Amino acid sequence: MTYSIIIPTLNEEKLLPKLLNILNDEKLRKKYNFEIIISDGGSTDKTIEVAEPRADKIVKPSDSKKQNIPIGRNMGASQATGNILIFFNGDIYPKDMFEVFRTIEEKFVGSKYLAMTCKVEVFPKEQILTDKIFHSFYNFYFHFLNIVGLGMGRGECHIIKKEVFEEMNGYNESFAAGEDFDLFRRIRKKGEILFARNIVVYESPRRYRKEGHFKILFTWLINSVYIMFTKTAKSKEWEQVR
């Protein structure tokens, strides 16, 4: 079994090294056959410089046109050779990458599941009570959406069988936001999604600190409603927060 870890980036020089160092653990590299693909959206900081010695492939835009996250993910996937596609955001890191691979091999590969996702929490050292409350709700709610058949997996961690990703034609590149919900919603119509509650990825709290949890939750809900009923996203741009 081979894996392709695809990471879309845009000016992530500060947070990206943490994820890449975890993925380049010597024991992890020896045990699992995976490639690391950085799909950069036109960073103007040192993201590429940070990524070059730690990534197997770096994909860059072919022109100066502004690139959003779904475009970046699709571009990375187009260069992937793995049977399983693992999409991570550049501002996250897994609690235990060995556990991620173990769960994929024991519960996902060869199973009825078409895609897989997991719990998301804020960086432990920066977590506050509000983060704990809201993420407990987020994780329960997103798990519930998969159970009732709507489908959901936050873009911080999407794990998809390559043939399923190709059948779905990847992420909808016209969506500035909600592309993660849209893809998992389409996948859920075809089959089941595994929500692995034993796996946690930690995300930066920077957006919550700037915009607040309620605003972000409202934005997610509005985009979800628009996607379900109009097949378009309400948000025209997902603002960069660095």
Image (tube, rainbow, N blue to C red):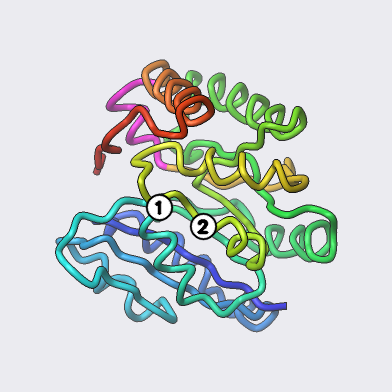
Q: Residue at x 56, y 27 (%)?
A: 135
Above or below 226: residue 28 = below
Dominant secondary structure (helix, strand or loop) of the stretch shown in magenta: helix
Q: How many marks?
A: 2
Where disc 2 sits, the SS reads: loop
User: Can you identify the residue that label 1 sits on?
Assistant: 70
- N-terminal of the pair, mark 2 or mark 1, is 1
Give coordinates of residue 200: x percent, y percent: 62, 45
| Chain part drawn in magenta | 204-212
Which label belongs to residue 170? 2
Left or right position of 42 against 125: left
Residue 31 quadrant? bottom right
| Residue 108 part of the magenta segment | no
Q: Nearer the viewer, residue 100 or 62?
A: 62
Give coordinates of residue 1: x percent, y percent: 73, 78
Q: Residue at x 36, y 57 (%)?
A: 71
| Residue 211 part of the magenta segment | yes
Above or below 56: residue 140 = above
Of the residues shown, which amino acid type is indicated by label 2?
Gly
Q: Residue at x 39, y 69 (%)?
A: 38
Of the residues shown, which amino acid type is indicated by label 1?
Pro
Where disc 1 sits, the SS reads: helix
Give coordinates of residue 3: x percent, y percent: 62, 73
CA–CA distance in space, label 2 to label 1: 8 Å
Residue 105 quadrant? bottom right
Circles 2 and 1: CB distance less than 8 Å?
yes
